Image (tube, rainbow, N blue to C red):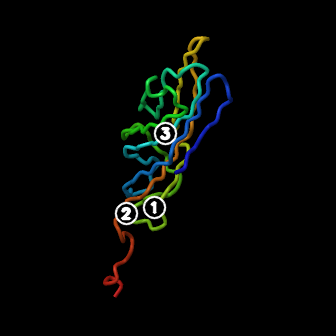
Amino acid sequence: MVLLATPGPATAGDIVVAARETAASVAPAEAPRELVNLPALEFGLRAAFKCSGSPVSLTLSVADTHTTLPQDQLTDQRSAEATLKVPTRQLALAASSPFCIADDPDSSDELLVPGFATVHASLRCSGDDGESAHFASAPLKVRLICERASGAGQESPSAAD
């Protein structure tokens, strides 16, 4: 499991968010493409936090998808985990190399794309001094895997005779 984190300065309230690398299968394209349309993606997220009082809520978001963990799930905790399922069409990805092109043996079958999108975290705390909000973000990594049919692009032994 690989986690990416963006640490912030330590304060009376603090939050750090991290995301596991996720993978997505992509169908081959007939020609080079500028954009790869991503399928629905599932991101495993973790936030480590502290409040000078008590946590009120923690919101994690990717694109237009978000989840909010309420106070009862955060009390006496130093971290929280959540899974966000981001539907298709919320994230578009620019192809940066010849990737997954049908009938092109030189195009790659796997592409690691770091930082094409970001997870955002928002922590609300409540204490003797009132309420405060703390924010963090981290880049997301997606590994694209080409769904070529087995043996695609290879000559069959009978055709070589």
Write down the residue under mark 2: 148
Q: Mark 1 Cα within 10 Å, few/some/many (few <14, many 20+)?
A: some
Measured Cα–Cα span from mark 1 to mark 3: 27 Å
**2 or 3: tag closer to the N-terminus:** 3
Q: What residue did someone put label 3 on? A: 45
- Labelled disc at residue 151: none
Q: Name the residue beneath numbered marker 1.
A: 109
Mark 1 or 2, nearer chain start: 1
Q: Pick the residue in front: 153 or 43.
A: 43
The mark nearer the N terminus, 1 or 3, is 3
Closer-to-camera residue (78/110):
78
Secondary-structure class at tag 2: loop
Check the image and name the residue furthest to the bottom.
Answer: 161
Which of the two residues, 31 or 138, is positioned nearer the viewer here? 138
Q: Is residue 160 above or below residue 90?
A: below
Check whether the beta carbons of the residues at disc 1 and disc 2 lie within 8 A of each other: yes
Q: What amino acid type should be assigned to the residue bearing mark 1?
A: Asp
- Most extreme residue toward the front, as rendered? 76
Q: Position of residue 76 (x, y in %)?
A: 52, 28
Amino acid type for the residue under numbered disc 2: Arg
Do the numbered discs 2 and 3 sit on residues whose CB atoms are within 8 Å?
Answer: no
Callout in the foreground (1, 3): 3
The residue located at (48%, 23%) in the rendering is 57
